[in-house]
Amino acid sequence: MAITATLAGQSHAYELYADDDTQLNADLLAVFGMMNSRKNYDGTTGGSTWREGFIKYGLSGQQGLGSAGSLYGAFNLVSSGTWGDGDPAGNTLGTERTSKIEDAYLGWRSGDLFPVLGKDGVDFSAGRQVVKLGRGFLINDDGPNLGKGPADGALNRGGAYYIAARHAFDRTAVLRLGGEDGVHGSLVWLKSDNRAQAETELAAGTLDYTSYAGTLGLTWVHGLDVNQRWATPIQSERDNLNVYSIRGEGSAGIENANFAFEYAWQDVDTGVEKAWYAEAGYTFADAPWSPNLTYRYTRYSGGWDSLFTGLSSGYGTWVQGEVAGNYAGPFNSNTGIHHVALKASPMEGVTLGALYFDYSTLHDRDTLNLDARELDLYAEWAVSDHLIISPLVGLYQPKKSADNGGNQVGGNGTNVYSQLMVIVPF
């Protein structure tokens, strides 16, 4: 999911036509995954073996308007399916098949029309598209892709749960001001048609300052509406919700270093919830394979609403652990997480990585205790510009089983999870 989520947010296109003012592309991204989990987390025994796949296809392009800037847009569909047993959390049953519109948006960039705001200092877009704020800690995309398992299929979005076939919000309006350097910001309105997100409607804004050392920013999110029919108890409080955060990321002027943090608090009818993380990393650029080592601690309070977070920039952000983050929980609420990541590149086009997570349930431990540890080992091999292969093995060790306060069926022994992803981008 790390690669597919990252690729889904990028442009992968075959150029059909281009001149000085016009560009028209054919878009194509195909992903197929084979997965196996020896343990389940939905109350059933025997483990799960299943397959997921999707193809995203359509058109994108842009048109220059001379001194008046440029227009851009895209129209893409996604066809997805799940086969086999379905995933070990029971989100899919293996019988999901769906084709739906994914991207359908138009936008305008100002070019040099407003010099005080910089190149393309005004960028307005509207329609069905992905919206991300900051590093995606609060809003990353509309990613949950449930199948026919939960709520007797009422939340079915087409399956392909792990590889996250669909990311776009149903309706959006996004105004970005100031480009990417210095002072810049955005105003956002979005409406989800995802029942797993209770068809939430939000407004949001950001204000950032970016320099060579990194970015400092503020985020505000306000809940406008939620469909109570589909809402969980936490989601039901999104109507009139207010979220505020301060965040930062960058090198802080230290070569080969990277730092990031965000502190957020939610005002809801029942009180205040908080979540935060702090992260530091360093790339040993002169060492063989140029390894990168990162440590992060994240803490989500007991009733924290994870909103529209998702897999942002690779394994572990913000789906924390391939087993825990996708199937076993915790799902970015009521937990503290220590995370260590190590990755290296032994040769061009090949990345090897190891991810370690330690989860501690904060409150109501007698109700559901999800204390656990997880180690994920993976590789990413870019065979060519149009073929990426990524195997992964996850070792998940919960403290409790379903028999004594946890949710892993068949004891609290180590679950061995494995997968093989094949990605074909154009």
Image (cartoon, rainbow, N blue to C red):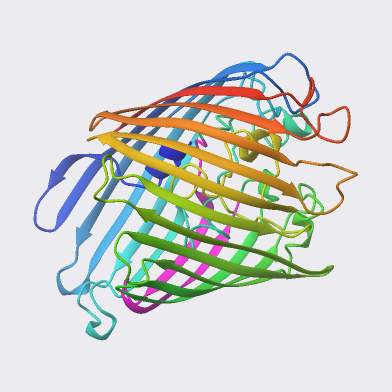
264 and 69: which one is in front?
264
Residue 215 is one of the magenta-drawn residues: no
The quarter of the displayed image where residue 200 is located:
bottom right
Q: Residue furthest left?
A: 20
Residue 8 in sight from this viewpoint: no
Magenta: main secondary structure equals strand
Judged left or right of residue 366, residue 222 is left
**Could you say where residue 422 lies in the image, as x and y percent from the top left?**
39, 24
Quadrant (top left/top right/bottom left/bottom right) for the C terminus: top left
Q: Residue furthest front?
A: 287
Q: Which residue lies furthest to the bottom in this view?
A: 116
Relative to 2, does residue 248 appear above or below in the rendering? below
Q: Give me the residue at 19% from left, 66% from top.
A: 65
Q: Give me the residue at 68% from left, 45% from top.
A: 359
Relative to 8, does residue 425 appear above or below in the rendering? above
Q: What is the span of residues highlighted in magenta in the rendered image? A: 164-192
**Could you say where residue 133 lies in the image, as x and y percent from the top left?**
49, 63
Judged left or right of residue 118, residue 277 is right
**Could you say where residue 117 lies in the image, as x and y percent from the top left?**
29, 81
The quarter of the displayed image where residue 416 is located:
top right
1 and 122: which one is in front?
1
**Could you say where residue 108 lies in the image, as x and y percent from the top left?**
31, 66
| Total numbered circles | 0
Q: Give me the residue at 52% from left, 45% from top.
A: 316
Residue 184 is one of the magenta-drawn residues: yes
Residue 68 in sight from this viewpoint: yes
387 and 12: which one is in front?
387
Relative to 135, does residue 329 appear above or below in the rendering? above
Q: Give me the residue at 72% from left, 30% from top.
A: 153
Judged left or right of residue 342, residue 371 is right
